[in-house]
Image: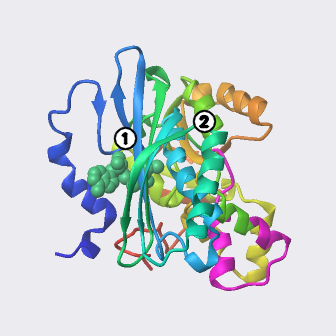
């Protein structure tokens, strides 16, 4: 059997069982946005790692090295945000072809340093190797969180309200602008910026981590319709998404109508949004959304509920069942039709 037949998540489910057995007490391994290692003082160490591969995650000719350095770190910080934690340090492994320009490398590190300095994340080490082909960037980030603030993917309960912390689909819109080589007006510039410079929702993650009414949380990397399935698997539940509630930026709405894009597909399955997807105890929803609004001067968007049969995702539009042909990006399965 080929990897392409089981896909990324099939692979993870296949390899993980022996590594989930006999873990030391206070350690949570494979299955969440970051591993959790209790430190015995009411705090935990969080560890996460993510790789960016040239041609798969970025196109060298269309990405500035400065933005790439920033993005490589941001996508890892996002996984710490998803746990309700604060990042502290990072390690960077680089695979570079021999003909990589030193100026390109300098710019990459300048971008990485800028974000690291802003978030007070110390680069503590890494590894550098020659790559026979694409540029490979692997970053590991360590973080910390009070144990009581950590939000697991496994904590969702029937009746919870499903929420996201930001607009969806902008990054995918930016990617379309690049791939279709569209002329860049104001909307397109906004979408490109959102694609190249994703923001990890660290402050949002910390605020939501401190709210006992927030149950499960993760970051949106593949697209809501794919990521919600991770919560459904880990929490043994189903979910309902109300498509008309998904938050969309004015730029994406107008660019979609202008360029004839399928807005629902971009918003639901586009991926690389790096906002947070969370479930909230309905009796705490007013408290949580008020705290969010007060701190960030914008709304926490309620997009659906944890409901229905285990493993079943139901999509509704304006109260009626909706059908959709497309799902989130899987690295080995490719996009399903
Ligand atoms: P995320 O998108 O939040 O980084 P993923 O969906 O990539 O998480 O991975 C899901 C889980 O599987 C995570 O806990 C991750 O650490 C784990 N994982 C992914 N690939 C591997 C691997 N090759 N070996 C061990 N664990 C893995
Ligand atoms: Mg994640």
Name the residue carrying label 2.
120
In the picture, the disc for residue 89 is none
Q: Report whether residue 273 is seen.
A: no
Dot 2: element: loop
Q: Nearer the viewer, residue 130 or 285?
A: 130
Q: Write the residue at 77% across / 73% down.
A: 188
Q: Write the residue at 29% across / 39% down.
A: 29
Dot 1: element: helix
* Magenta run includes residue 169: yes
Q: Report whether residue 213 is seen.
A: yes
Q: Write the residue at 28% across / 75% down.
A: 4
- Seen in the picture, residue 208 relative to 106 is either above or below; the reply is above
Q: Nearer the viewer, mark 1 or mark 2?
A: 2
Q: Quadrant of residue 317?
A: bottom right
Question: Tag 2 or tag 1, which sits nearer the N-term?
Answer: 2
Query: Is 40 left, or right, of 22 in this rendering?
Result: right
Magenta-drawn segment: 164-190
Q: CA distance from mark 1 to mark 2?
A: 33 Å
Name the residue carrying label 1.
235
């Amino acid at each position: 059997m080929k990897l392409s037949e089981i896909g990324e998540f099939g692979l993870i489910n296949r390899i993980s069982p022996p590594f989930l057995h006999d873990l030391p007490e206070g350690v949570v391994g494979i299955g969440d946005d970051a591993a959790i290692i209790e430190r015995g003082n009411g705090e935990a160490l969080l560890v996460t790692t993510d790789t960016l591969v040239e041609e798969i995650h970025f196109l060298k000719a269309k990405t500035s090295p400065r933005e790439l350095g920033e993005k490589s770190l941001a996508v890892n910080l996002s996984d710490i945000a998803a746990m309700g934690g604060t990042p502290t340090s990072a390690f960077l492994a680089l695979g570079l072809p021999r003909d990589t320009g030193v100026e390109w490398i300098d710019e990459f590190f300048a971008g990485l340093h800028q974000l690291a300095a802003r978030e007070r994340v110390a680069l503590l080490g890494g590894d550098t190797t020659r790559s026979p082909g694409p540029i490979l960037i692997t970053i590991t980030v360590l973080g910390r969180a009070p144990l009581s603030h950590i939000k697991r993917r496994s904590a969702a309960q029937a009746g919870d309200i499903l929420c996201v912390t930001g607009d969806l689909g902008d990054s995918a819109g930016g990617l379309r602008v690049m791939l279709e080589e569209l002329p860049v007006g104001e909307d397109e510039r906004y979408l490109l910026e959102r694609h190249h410079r994703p923001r990890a929702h660290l402050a949002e993650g910390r605020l939501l981590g401190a709210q006992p009414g927030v149950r499960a949380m993760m970051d949106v990397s593949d697209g809501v319709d794919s990521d919600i399935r991770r919560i459904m698997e880990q929490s043994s539940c189903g979910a309902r998404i109300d498509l008309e509630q998904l938050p969309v930026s004015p730029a994406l709405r107008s660019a979609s109508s202008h360029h004839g894009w399928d807005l629902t597909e971009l918003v639901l399955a586009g991926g690389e949004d790096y906002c947070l997807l969370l479930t909230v105890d309905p009796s705490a929803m007013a408290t949580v959304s008020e705290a969010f609004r007060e701190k960030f001067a914008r709304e926490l968007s309620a997009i659906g509920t944890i409901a229905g049969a285990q493993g079943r995702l139901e999509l509704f539009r304006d109260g009626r069942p909706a059908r959709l042909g497309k799902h989130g990006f899987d690295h080995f399965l490719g996009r399903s039709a």
